[in-house]
Image (cartoon, grey):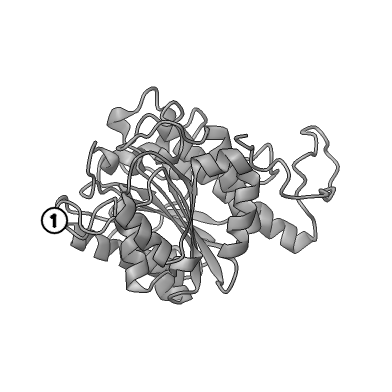
Amino acid sequence: MSRYGQQFGPDFTFLGVPPCDLADPESYAGADVVIVGAPFDGGTSHRPGTRFGPQAIRGTDYLGHDGSRPSLALRTDGLQDLRVVDAGDVEMPPGDIETCLSRLTAAVEAISASGAIPVILGGDHSIAFADATGVANVHGHGRVSMIHFDAHADTGDVEFGSLWGHGQPMRRLIESGALRGDRFLQVGLRGYWPGPETLDWMADQRMRSYEMTEIVHRGLTECLTEAFAIATDECDGVFLSVDIDVCDPGHAPGTGTPEPGGLSARQLLDSVRRSCLELPVVGVDVVEVSPPYDHADITAALANRVVLEALSAIARRRADARDGTTWDPARPLLDRSPRHTPASDPTTDQAEDTS
């Protein structure tokens, strides 16, 4: 089949990167990153609208869509220093969640098998089952850990009479064996769900969930350092799943299940940057952007920057590995010297503490 493009609206790519067609492997052969949209909100339990998320994330920017974004902080251009292409959306028939997840799993698996990193734009969080499964099918079940930024654990069992929905993908991933419970790290949980029975199940799987009270008390930097050590123990790659509702609704109002008291936009961007600088990331998804509930594109703009921060950091990590340099977060912006000055502690100040 020819390129499907965007399921809703005109066919344009993420900030103007070249298009590709998943039906034509030659069109993404040699790519470092393949972006793909998953315009599905059939797993939503509260406010819908995330089917329009991929379109909003691709397009929300005040700069031209020229396929270039030099990062002031990282001194890389994630869209130029990496070969990034956009496959458009996976066709997802509304109301048929199992067909949608099956199609998305196949698409992500094809991207991962090509050697590229899949970056999936959601869509509600039910798509994480397909995203992480597709990657694990290539890298090996139990060989990929998960760093999961979210206000909610998404470990429900049967909800509304169904095994599938945006509150259940993490449970299904662990039950399927695609991911290990003891290499499943969650950051930003808060609020009043899930209940004790589900929390007991999570504890039995040896999951590690950082609730916001612990993050505030210990500091975000310390929690991430601990999580990263677990994520890289006996696993070859890390999947990064970012639910935009991990941020406080003041920073991300356009989402389906907002929960007050979350991370700031700055903390999320720094955390994503640090994750992709320090970890062998093999897949990323950004989910739960619901444009109908957004205000002035605040949430879509943040999600766009989450993607850019991830790509810029992956490019920086590869450049440092190639050149023997170390990114220094304390380096002044206008220091134009060609070499990086190694930081005494590369984790310092990369993620702002909440304490």
Q: Is residue 299 above or below residue 100?
A: above
In the image shown, does 264 or 10 lie closer to the viewer? 264
Label 1, on which residue?
161
Q: Is residue 194 above or below residue 180?
A: above
Q: Residue at x 40, y 66 (%)?
A: 204
Q: Is residue 29 visible?
A: no
Classify residue 292 by image quadrant: top left
Crowd class of label 1 (few under 14; some 14 to 19; many from 20; radius 10 Å) = few
Classify residue 244 by image quadrant: top left
Q: Is residue 87 left or right of residue 71?
A: left
Amino acid type, residue under disc 1 in the picture: Gly
Q: Residue at x 71, y 57 (%)?
A: 319
Q: Is residue 35 above or below residue 151?
A: below
Classify residue 293 by image quadrant: top left
Q: Is residue 311 left or right of residue 277?
A: left
Q: Residue at x 31, y 36 (%)?
A: 290
| Count of labels in the image | 1
Q: Residue furthest bottom?
A: 140
Q: Residue at x 42, y 69 (%)?
A: 179
In the rendering, at what x and y percent does residue 317 appear? 67, 56
Q: Quadrant of the C terminus?
A: top right
Q: Quadrant of the N terminus?
A: bottom left
In the rendering, at what x and y percent does residue 74 appear? 69, 44
In the image shown, does 338 or 204 lie closer to the viewer? 204
Q: Is residue 225 visible?
A: yes
Q: Residue furthest top?
A: 296
In the rendering, at what x and y percent does residue 285 appear? 43, 52
In the rendering, at what x and y percent does residue 102 appear? 25, 65
